[in-house]
Image: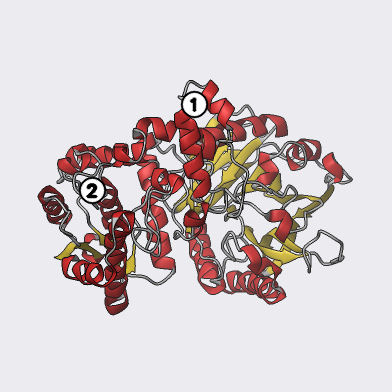
Amino acid sequence: MPQLRLALNQIDSTVGDLAGNSESVVHWTRHAAEQGAHLVAFPEMVLTGYPVEDLALRSSFVEASRRALRALATRLADEGLGELPVVVGYLDRSEHPASRYGQPAGSPRNAGAVLHRGEVALNFAKHHLPNYGVFDEFRYFVPGDSMPVVRVRGIDVALAICEDLWQDGGRVPATRAAGAGLLLSVNASPYERDKDDTRLELVRRRAREAGCTTAYLAMMGGQDELVFDGDSIVVDKDGEVVARAPQFSEGSVILDLELPAAPAEAPSGVVDDGLRIDHVVISGDPLPAYEPELAGGYAERLDDDEELYSALVVGLRAYAAKNGFRSVLIGLSGGIDSALVAAIACDAVGAENVYGVSMPSKYSSEHSRSDAAELARRTGLNYRTVSIEPMFDAYMGALGLTGLAEENLQSRLRGTTLMAISNQEGQIVLAPGNKSELAVGYSTLYGDSVGAYGPIKDVYKTSVFRLAKWRNRAAEERGQTPPIPEASITKPPSAELRPDQMDTDSLPDYDVLDRILEMYVDRDQGRDAIVAAGFDPELVTRTLRMVDTAEYKRRQYPPGTKISPKGFGKDRRLPITNRWRESG
């Protein structure tokens, strides 16, 4: 059978950085050429970054993407890489835009192109457009109607983009109808907990349906709330894994494949879902037989906790770097949330770029102060103490606050202190709130919600504890100092805004609370379904009421890394003004 050396580049890109993204494509194409690749591929919309959101509706940006694609083709040829076909994702528009009700103006397309000899040899658009979760592609794009097939070294390669694999019909059965020897899908599929298992089974199933070897190339990196975990996969026509790339690691998977020869007569006509076969010949003759040298490899999977922690680190690192922030600022209470955020930050941007501030009040326990100092000692982050007592006394003298207003004043003084230091010194503030607290509104607006990014915004409290234990255990296994003091993990959670305060004074036990929240928030289960699952009816009613009435608070919380199927942000869109209550 004919042979093909395929290079799959699971790299990061930055939305809007057309020049920087083009530079990355050239760099990794050169690397692939040095390894003797015959076909090189990059992720979905790598040239523009993904997702571009409403930038897709700006004709200026669409045209800039099209110009950048043509310039990239020319540059590859000028640098001696023109003979190597390169598959690149970018933002395009239909050549025949038709204004129609419900269709985005200008008919933008989530597109891919094959670059060869300084030209765009073939272009195509995503056929299936996702419109669920974080995806709004019906808002932004018009679908493609072709079945792109490119002949490389005597092998017909069918091309697809992300959702073309996730949905039934369309390009997968069309690949079989076209008789292609390889199905190559370029993707920017965001990370979610346990998605790696789902993804593998999907690629296996689609390979069997397409009847050919299938390569799933994934993006790696972060964009605002989204994290991309890489994990590119190649399976044979029977669904057996041929190669698998590392998770959360940028790089290139290069492997030798033996694939069926293309038919003598090029495929043509209309196939599944009315797709028109668009066939282009790059190189019709097979290569002389050679000894396969590159197998692509199989990267070991991360365990669940390491995978989740890695996603949080990559998300924060990408957000800081892509927005030009070199350092971060964290309020250190001695509690588990700020301790985990500090550990993530140290791993993401380096301890020398992490600044921690302890801001004790008269209600702060001695162990909380010492736990914050111990965290700083263990991690090596920059540390200082700024007491809020004088400010608190001045406010109380002027306003005479009591009860909840007095408690929240402390939190707001801490938020003001952090923002003042941020303005003075240039660090961005990280908000330490977790998903459990955000769900039930157990946070103070303009206090502990202050910040530019919330690294654990989508992490339930029970997972916060589990990740903290994992991070310490991982450090011990590497012969390093565990970053998080044991006392921060074992002591009962408390906001310490009044004497002897505990979270359980206001909230159910976190183990129970998180299981209720997972059903209500992540899975959209109603009260009756949650009660039927065995939870106390009164507790369910109270919890759901807290969630429903806290929507206005969540809208004012900063963005944070999404790791669940439904995070607070683009995934979950509920009206703030809303009198419907599951609790009656």
- The image quadrant where one finds the N terminus is top right
Q: On the picture, is 476 further left or further right than 420?
A: left
Image coordinates of residue 105 in percent, x first then y, are: 78, 67
Position in image of residue 214 (x %, y %): 63, 38
Mark 2 highlights which residue?
335
Tell me the kind of residue under disc 2: Gly
Q: Residues within 10 Å of mark 1 (few under 14, many from 20)?
A: some
Amino acid type, label 1: Pro
Can residue 517 be seen from the camera position used here? no
| x and y percentages locating residue 97 in the rendered image | 84, 66
- Secondary structure of the residue carrying tag 1 is helix
**Which residue occupies the foreground of this view, 383 or 176?**
383
Decide: few, some or many residues near mark 2? Use Cα within 10 Å; few <14, some 14-19, many ≥20: many
Residue at image point 27% right, 76% down = 425
> Which residue is painted at 48% across and 31% down in the image?
540
Left or right? Give the position of 20 relative to 128. Answer: left
Instruction: Describe residue 180's horizontal placement relative to residue 566 as left or right.
Output: right
